[in-house]
Amino acid sequence: MATAGRLGDLHTLTQRARQYANKVIHGEVYPLTADHVDLSRVTFETSNRMKRNHGVCSYDGGGDCTIRLSETTYDRAGFDAIKQTIRHELVHAYQHQTDGISAGHGQSFKQWVDPLDLDGRCSTPYEKQPADYKYRFYCTDGCEFLGGRHRWSKAVRRAIEGAQVCGNCEAELRVEDEEGVLEEIPECRKDDASSEDTLCYQFYCENCGFIGGRKRMCKTVRQVVKGLTLCEDCGSTEITVRDSDENPVTAADL
């Protein structure tokens, strides 16, 4: 049988990903088959810019999907770690290509978690490094590097102001960016203090933190809640919507 699927580039990861996807769909190990995913309408690509997600599946609205995989994850964790990501993104391809099914990590995704041996949510097969974040959090009492944020957010502001502490020992945090320690709110951010609070619907990416919102219910809010919108910075569909009372907004609330 000919290998199905298109190559968006000639990267080694792209070629291996297409071959593995064919083993998943046309093999006997997993129940996801050609009846669920039309690989002839899937393009495989490798991204050397994707550092916050392991992979993403985008859709053109007409049946064609692109599965884009992270070169960073491949380099750091190897192809075995990428295999689960490929199976994860094939489920999203199934969602996009099947009428009446919404994309995202709802029930139509969860039904494949055990059969495809998935974690259910994106896991991190390698240890994050400080250089992976624009804003980095350090414990001031020995716990060292704790994590960070890819862009300015309420969490970064709270850490600088001393309102956020180490989850291990409750010591204060030190925040650093590429220029060094941030001992106070940067001048360019002082007018942003209430930017999140003025929005009735706030969008939070699992990787990037606060990424925007809307003052009223609209088409954009509905698309984000349904998992139909990608984060412009990292490509993730894992975006949480919260209302002005900090309550999560779900599809049942639309």
Image: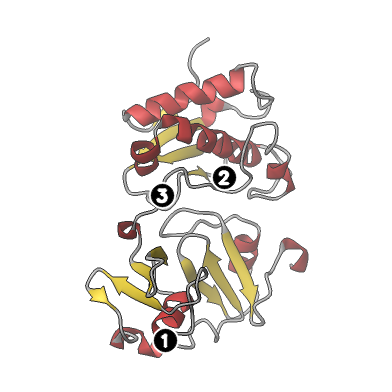
Farthest right residue in view: 252
Q: Verify CB contact (< 8 Å) between mark 2 and mark 1.
A: no
Residue 17: which quarter of the image? top left
The residues bearing labels 2 and 1 have C-alpha atoms spaced at a distance of 45 Å
Look at the picture and state if 235 lies above or below 58. Answer: below
- Percent from the top left, x then y, of residue 220? 58, 66
Mark 2, Cα crowd under 10 Å, few <14 / some 14-19 / many 20+, is few
The residues bearing labels 3 and 2 have C-alpha atoms spaced at a distance of 35 Å
Q: Secondary structure under badge 1?
A: helix
Pointer 1 residue:
161
Pointer 3 residue:
127
Q: Secondary structure under badge 3?
A: loop
Name which residue lies at 55% across and 86% down: 198
Instruction: Say left or right for 75 vs 79.
Output: left
Look at the picture and state if 143 lies above or below 227. Answer: below
Going from the N terminus, do you reach mark 1 or mark 3 first? 3
The answer to whether residue 63 shows anywhere in this view is: no
Q: Amino acid at mark 1?
A: Glu
Q: Amino acid at mark 2?
A: Gly
